[in-house]
Image (tube, rainbow, N blue to C red):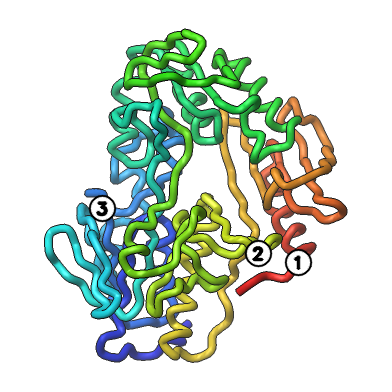
Amino acid sequence: MTTAGPARPGDAVVIVGGGVAGITAAESLRSAGFTGPVTVIGEEPQLPYRRTALSKDLLAADLSPDKIRLRKPEFWAERDITIVTGTTVAAVDAETREVVCADGRRVGYRALVLATGGRPRTVDTVDPTVPSLRHHGDALELQRRLPSQPVVIIGGGLIGLEIAASATAVAPSVTVLEAAPTVLARVLPAQAADAVVALHHDHGVAIHTGVDIAAATPTTVTTTDGTRYEGTVLSAIGMVPDTALARSAGAEVGPAGILVDRDLRSSVPGVYAAGDAAATPHPLTGEPARAEQWMTATDHGKLVAATILADFGADEAPAPAVSPIPLAWTIHYSRNMQLAGWPGMADRVVAEGDVAGFDAEIRCYLGEDLVGGVALGRPVAGRAMRTQIEDALTAPVRR
């Protein structure tokens, strides 16, 4: 499909962030026939790679860069996409339409995509030297350290539990500390969360909830009741969107991230956001919301490319096949679970199958509306529920 036509002088697209959202945007621009300069700038030294492998395959796979990269090096050259690695963008000059790199380089753009993702969440009681799992180097360091000592994971979310599942293969013991009364309460119905907890218990993981941490270092966690845990300590308490460059550009931001419309335009002309950093209007509430999922980031990449081409005046083209409904997947001890929509918003759930045995479908309703679904061991069902939620979606969406 060639709908973009020849680029005009100055029709350069700069993408900050080498994750799946940014890379998909670059690929989609070329697939649509855009011929102008496309530059992707990433702060990590590696070519773009599958970030999901860091937690899902932490110890079960070879995480060397050539094994988890998204594309071979020649892929980018063949499509005339410039990949700049190991480079931090320090600021955005929205008046001159340039990004300013930390090394002083300035790169001009007509369209700028901020696919900056997020940074690990921090709290005062956890020392900033406690490692998290966000970058490739983090994973390699954890692979080196885990086999030699007990593992203590702060945070019982999906990422923390994925790491716990991987760590059980080599670590002497694995402990998960969660501040909330239960794990996964914000993302799963109670029966699904119970099944996940039971699965981890069966594999020897100790999960403690309602834990109030007094202090944590890379080797020790002390709780307010005086309990002390020792070993390799890892923080998995979530992420915050990286909005620094959006602020530098003068774009509106909020607690959920960089504020964009449904088509991923920010409040500053020529500046867009995609992926984990972008806060789009929630399809049910209209409030800014962020979805930290691979498929959402992929859809954002496709959508932002189409939006840029439309703003450049490209010929009319079919809208990209994207969905506003999140779909996430997670694996624990080879058991697959998919989450569609927003199960945590439900006030009623209907389960079919063997939930405890990880062979079930759970539909989540808010009133009479299907708003979420969980598929345990049934990946096809997860995708089907995503479609069902989208078909049932009738609430107005704010642009």
| For residue 161, side relative to residue 129 (left or right) | right
Disc number for residue 286: 2
Judged by depth in the image, the label closer to the viewer, 2 or 3, is 2
Q: Residue at x 25, y 89 (%)?
A: 9
Judged by depth in the image, the label closer to the viewer, 3 or 1, is 1
Q: Residue at x 45, y 35 (%)?
A: 55
Element on which disc 3 rests: loop
Q: Which residue type does callout 3 highlight? A: Glu
Q: Is residue 77 visible in the rendered structure shown here?
A: no
Q: Is residue 227 visible in the rendered structure shown here?
A: yes
Query: First in sequence: mark 2 or mark 3?
Result: 3
Q: Which residue type does callout 2 highlight? A: Gly
Q: Which residue type does callout 1 highlight? A: Ala
Task: Please provide percent x and percent y for residue 68.
Answer: 36, 45
Query: First in sequence: mark 1 or mark 2?
Result: 2
Q: Quadrant of the C terminus?
A: bottom right
Q: CA distance from mark 2 to mark 3?
A: 33 Å
Residue situated in front as seen by the camera: 132 or 30? 132
Quick check: marks 3 and 1 in contact, CB under 8 Å? Answer: no
| For residue 326, side relative to residue 313 (left or right) | right
Residue situated in front as seen by the camera: 7 or 97? 97
Task: Please provide percent x and percent y for residue 168.
Answer: 48, 18
Name the residue that disc number 1 marks.
395
Query: First in sequence: mark 3 or mark 1?
Result: 3
Q: Residue at x 47, y 8 (%)?
A: 226
Name the residue that disc number 3 marks.
43
